[in-house]
Amino acid sequence: MLDLIWLVPGLPLAGFLVLTVAGRRIGEPGAGWLATGALTGSFLVTVGVHLDLAGRAVDDRRSVTTLFEWVPAGDLSVDVGFLVDPLALTMCLFITGVGALIHMYAIGYMHGDVDFGRFFAYMNLFAFAMLMLVLGDSLLLTFLGWEGVGACSYLLISFWFTDEANASAGKKAFITNRIGDWGFMVAMFATFFAFGSLDYVDVLDAAAAGTVAQTTATLIAVMLFVGAVGKSAQFPLHLWLPDAMAGPTPVSALIHAATMVTSGVYLLTRVNPLIADAAGWVPDMIAWVGVGTALFAATAALAQTDIKKVLAYSTISQLGYMFLAVGTGAYVAAVFHMITHAFFKALLFLGAGSVIHGMDGDQDLRHYGGLRRFMPVTATTFIIGWLAIAGVPPFAGFWSKDEILAFAWDRSPALWLVGLVTAVLTAFYMTRQVALTFFGRYRYPEPRTGGEDPATVAARADHRPHESPLTMTLPLVVLAVLAIGGGLMQLPFSSSTKRLEAWLEPSLFGNEVHLGLGAGTQWVLAAVAVVGGAVGIALALVVYLQRRISDRAIERPLLADAWRFDRYVSGFMGGPGRRGFEATTRFDERVVDGAVWGVAGIVSRTAGVLRLFHNGMVRTYAAGIGVGAVALLIWFLTRSTL
């Protein structure tokens, strides 16, 4: 099956090409089913390759399949090849599996859109780019996929580009990611300078052997971390992700739950030998940026009123947990949480899309209430996703989050405390979202402003929320099952129940940190985390269902505006930043370009003078010869000793 690995990215690429040429002709729903079938086929091939690799000895679970030579340039030779190992296949499994479910969901969600075929062409292209990112056998191929998902995110976020908010959100995502991409490029330059190669096999084996200078490893690790911060929306480059909610909900689920935003975590996990060889402050920096981002985003999620923006800030927060795990050396826990997060966050995003679909596009939590009786499947599956992300046992999110918190305690109690507070806030704001959406009174028909048109109020009164079609609810049910049982792959009870750890071992080069905590300590930490989550849930129910505490005490404008950080950045870029860019432009025009044009002007004027003596007239040339002869004669006479 390893020989068929090229089909994993090849099938969605073929789907993109077919839909680009004939998508409009195929139409709806054929274009959607074709795209879904392409990614489903990719998933089945991945399962086959996984079974092949799992049947091999642990030391034989890494294979490089070369397709062709891409860049032959002196000492630099880059092949298009795939590195197949447990880490890459784990990523491929949930990218293609969850991605196929999201594609199926989108068939119902995008029903009636005039650009139905174009949407699914972009979705398949995005899947291809993401699979190239994780399967590429070199940093350069990973960077190719890295840039591909960035370009596709722009196309998908701004898919409804006639709306200015969507177009601006796409541009914001694209530009913000370029900052992180600069770090990735510097890391590639430093890697080639130090190793003479960009292939993972050469670079990581050399790093694992301890032959890399600490300064070199530190530079490469820090620059890759900068790239990861941009792609995985960590502070301060998180700004693009909340605005990206302007795109279609299947895009939010695909890009911001299961694929693109996890690229940074994957990259740092992939280069774990370089992080191990770097200075000690590098993993500490990764951990603190992660846990700080997690807390920051959780506080912002407390006061959001857009159902998708709550999930957007939640995504930023959960990614912070993954960075915390990487920084503490818990690479298995990072991948574990990445997988469970793909399950429950895709479920929550798709559930939010189902609510929006049933509410005629309204995304404001304050306009919902009591929807569980109108949308029973959506409500039940969304509640399962809520329990998973809130860390309620035995749902999948509990096991992965608890493992990260245990590693954080082992590294630093301060890291653990910030992570625990974030977990409590997560339980609170997710309970708030569920309570406002599915419980309480049905608020949609109620008047919202004093001067509202009575006809508008009457139209809302006639509206009845409805359950989504089977193409949308079936993926919700499958993801709900995964959100319940996904934790079974990595249970902490014994080495035999840590299946994910045993599977990923060959990809970690022995750099996975093992807990130094006793069983009693781990049980106490788990109990504290469960109690913290229960407190967050109970407090939210008191505020938003029983109304014993005013929600105004929590939903502060400062939190709703995400601490005004985005506003400050926009103000700086539109004020001093714009003036600085304009000054740079003037310097370029007057000094840099001025010097070039000045030299050109001198040459032009000199040539103009000389052109007077080259006019094509014989008498001018004869006079020139005569003047030259006289000048030579005078020169010889003045130099003669006679």
Image: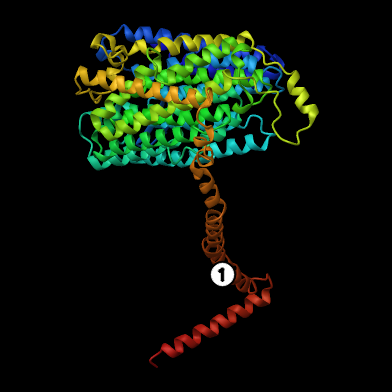
Residue 309 in percent (x, y) is at 54, 30
**Tell me, what colour scheme is on the image?**
rainbow
Determine if residue 611 is in view: yes
Picture residue at 70% right of the left edge, 21% below the top: 113
Question: In the orientation shown, which residue stands out farthest toward the front?
Answer: 548
Residue 472 in percent (x, y) is at 60, 13
Question: In the orientation shown, which residue stands out farthest toward the bottom?
Answer: 642
Residue 342 image-quadrant placement: top left
Residue 248 image-quadrant placement: top right
Picture residue at 41% right of the left edge, 39% below the top: 185
Tell me the quarter of the image containing the C terminus.
bottom left
Label 1 SS: helix
Counting labels gives 1
Picture residue at 62% right of the left edge, 8% below the top: 470
367 or 212, which lies in front? Answer: 367
From what the image shows, is residue 372 above or below residue 335? Answer: above
Residue 221 image-quadrant placement: top left
Picture residue at 66% right of the left edge, 17% below the top: 358
Q: Residues within 10 Å of mark 1 (few under 14, many from 20)?
A: few
436 or 208, which lies in front? Answer: 436
Tell me the quarter of the image containing the N terminus.
top left
Amino acid of disc 1: Ile
From what the image shows, is residue 26 above or below residue 224? Answer: above
Residue 282 in percent (x, y) is at 29, 38
Please state if 411 lies on the left or on the right of 23 as rendered. left
Determine if residue 145 is in view: no
Residue 21 in percent (x, y) is at 66, 20
Q: Which residue is mark 1?
A: 602
